[in-house]
Image (cartoon, helix red, strand yellow):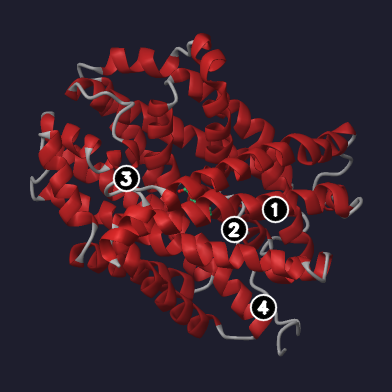
């Protein structure tokens, strides 16, 4: 392999650049699309409380795991695990690359919908009737429209990543992340003036402990999965981003800032979305994963100036998705640069093009999107995170704590506390999430439910 020759590696120009890039990765469809609907489905404030707990207990230690691996090795996930573990661990690194490849293929399709829906608002086109909104989503979500906007989105992702760390990613996130923050705050201020606001706040902000007690079996895994996804963990993104860091950085402080901002933005999105729902008289627990584009779009169709607010909202979501998508492509590209000696431009165009092609089935049929999503997000992501936690927690001795100490100084008892959080709660939560992911995927594969199950799809199409 022409590979492991040490080519000079780019680094982030500034500390802020690294933090914004990581925040940009974390804040994405997960915050806007998955978070409010997880809250809606899992009982409002009760879920919010458990989720916040999981962010701190599971998300924070797991992010540090990826950071120490990336900074120590200065490598992409495959190269990193090859250096630290060698042997079969190299293949574990391979899981990250495959996961990124697959996730980006449909993430880009969904991101394409957000661009389409921003334009739809400007055209004054949100259907206020739920059934009509569903039909509208059906025509826009699959087919030529979807493929076209998937292509536009991927082109933007490729353009940014091709420019590299400092001139591409760092520059882009310095514009995108502040924009996202300012606009979501503005939207929340607007939502405050809506009629349904006070009802929405009490639903969102006052947890009923009875709900947690009654439904913990579904709330706990949902909260763990969401915490992982929203922090961009399990896919090597944070390994890759930390590989462009120097040893003077305080990783614990940086992750606290990154996690704080991601959580804050998700929380504020809830302050936007729930008042809109309650004002339009829509049940926030309804709608499932299509709900951002059906239920919420219909709510925008229903309220005064909803077209404008909707357009701004969906455009912001598209920007958030873009700053996440570049982090995913960067994982795969950094692998090809480090391990295969391919230059950045060629790698970016080649991989970006291949990911676009892989996304086409998802842009043609929602069941196929679920086929990719259930496998990559429900299984691969969790598996990668689990193996990495076991590796750093149980198999690499003191390396994790040593690496964390750089840029911090004496860790005291915190270093041990961290490693024990990785060893037990993080590993257990991921094992539980993995089992549920596999069971859920099995259900999907064998389901005959019309328009939803894969067994149904096979019978219909083959
Ligand atoms: N964190 C991103 C979001 O919330 C999604 C993501 C997952 C990005 C994994 C990169 C890696 O949308």
Residue name at image x 58 percent, y 39 percent: 259
Q: Residue furthest left?
A: 124
Q: Which mark is residue 449?
A: 3
Q: Is mark 3 within 8 Å of ligand 1?
A: no
Q: Is mark 2 within 8 Å of ligand 1?
A: yes
Residue 103 x %, y %: 47, 59
Q: Nearer the N terminus, badge 4 or badge 3?
A: 4
Residue 28 x %, y %: 43, 48
Cα gap from disc 4 to disc 3, whole angstroms: 45 Å
Residue name at image x 44 percent, y 30 percent: 267
Secondary structure, mark 4, is helix
Q: Are marks 2 and 4 in contact (CB under 8 Å)?
A: no
Cα gap from disc 1 to disc 3, whole angstroms: 39 Å
Identify the residue under disc 2.
237
Cα gap from disc 3 to disc 2, whole angstroms: 35 Å
> Would you call the spot at circle 3 few (<14 residues within 10 Å), some (14-19), or many (20 or more)?
few
Q: Nearer the N terminus, badge 1 or badge 4?
A: 1
Identify the residue under disc 4.
338
Q: Nearer the viewer, residue 146 or 11?
A: 146
Is 289 located above or below residue 56 in the figure?
below
Residue 151 x %, y %: 30, 70
């Amino acid at each position: 392999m022409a590979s492991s020759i040490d080519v000079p590696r780019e680094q982030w120009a500034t500390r802020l650049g690294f933090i914004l890039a990581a925040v940009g990765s974390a804040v994405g469809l997960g915050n806007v699309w998955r978070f409010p609907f997880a809250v809606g489905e899992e009982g409002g404030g009760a879920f919010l409380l458990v989720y916040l707990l999981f962010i701190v207990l599971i998300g924070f230690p797991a992010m540090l795991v990826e950071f120490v691996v990336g900074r120590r090795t200065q490598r992409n996930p495959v190269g990193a695990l090859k250096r630290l573990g060698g042997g079969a661990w190299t293949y574990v690194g391979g899981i990250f690359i495959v996961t990124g490849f697959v996730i980006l293929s449909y993430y880009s399709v969904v991101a394409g919908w957000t661009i389409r829906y921003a334009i739809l608002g400007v055209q004054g086109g949100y259907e206020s009737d739920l059934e009509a909104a569903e039909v509208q989503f059906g025509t826009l979500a699959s087919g030529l429209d979807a493929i076209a906007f998937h292509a536009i989105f991927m082109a933007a992702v490729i353009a940014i990543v091709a420019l590299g760390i400092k001139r591409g990613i760092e520059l882009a996130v310095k514009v995108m992340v502040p924009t996202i923050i300012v606009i979501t705050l503005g939207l929340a201020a607007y939502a405050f003036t809506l009629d349904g606001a006070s009802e929405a706040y009490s639903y969102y902000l006052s947890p009923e402990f009875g709900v947690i007690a009654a439904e913990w079996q579904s709330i706990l895994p949902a909260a763990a999965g969401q915490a992982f996804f929203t922090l961009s963990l399990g896919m090597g993104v944070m390994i890759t981003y930390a590989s462009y860091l120097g040893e003077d950085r305080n990783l614990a402080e940086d992750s606290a800032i990154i996690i704080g901002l991601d959580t804050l933005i998700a929380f504020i999105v809830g302050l936007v979305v729930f008042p809109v729902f309650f004002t339009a008289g829509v049940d926030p627990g309804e709608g499932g994963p299509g709900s951002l584009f059906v239920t919420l779009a219909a709510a925008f169709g229903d309220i005064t100036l909803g077209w404008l607010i909707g357009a701004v909202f969906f455009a912001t979501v598209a920007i958030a998705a873009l700053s996440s998508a570049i982090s995913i492509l960067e994982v795969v590209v950094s692998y090809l640069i480090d391990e295969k000696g391919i230059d950045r431009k060629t790698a970016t165009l080649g991989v970006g093009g291949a990911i676009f092609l892989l996304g086409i089935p998802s842009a043609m049929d929602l069941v196929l999107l679920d086929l990719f999503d259930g496998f990559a997000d429900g299984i691969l992501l969790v598996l990668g995170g689990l193996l990495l936690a076991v590796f750093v927690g149980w198999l690499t001795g003191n390396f994790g704590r040593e690496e964390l100490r750089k840029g911090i100084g004496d860790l005291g008892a915190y270093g041990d506390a961290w490693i024990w959080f990785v060893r037990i709660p993080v590993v257990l939560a991921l094992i539980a999430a993995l089992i549920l992911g596999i069971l859920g995927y099995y259900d999907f594969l064998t389901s005959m439910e019309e328009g939803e199950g894969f067994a149904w799809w096979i019978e219909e199409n083959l």
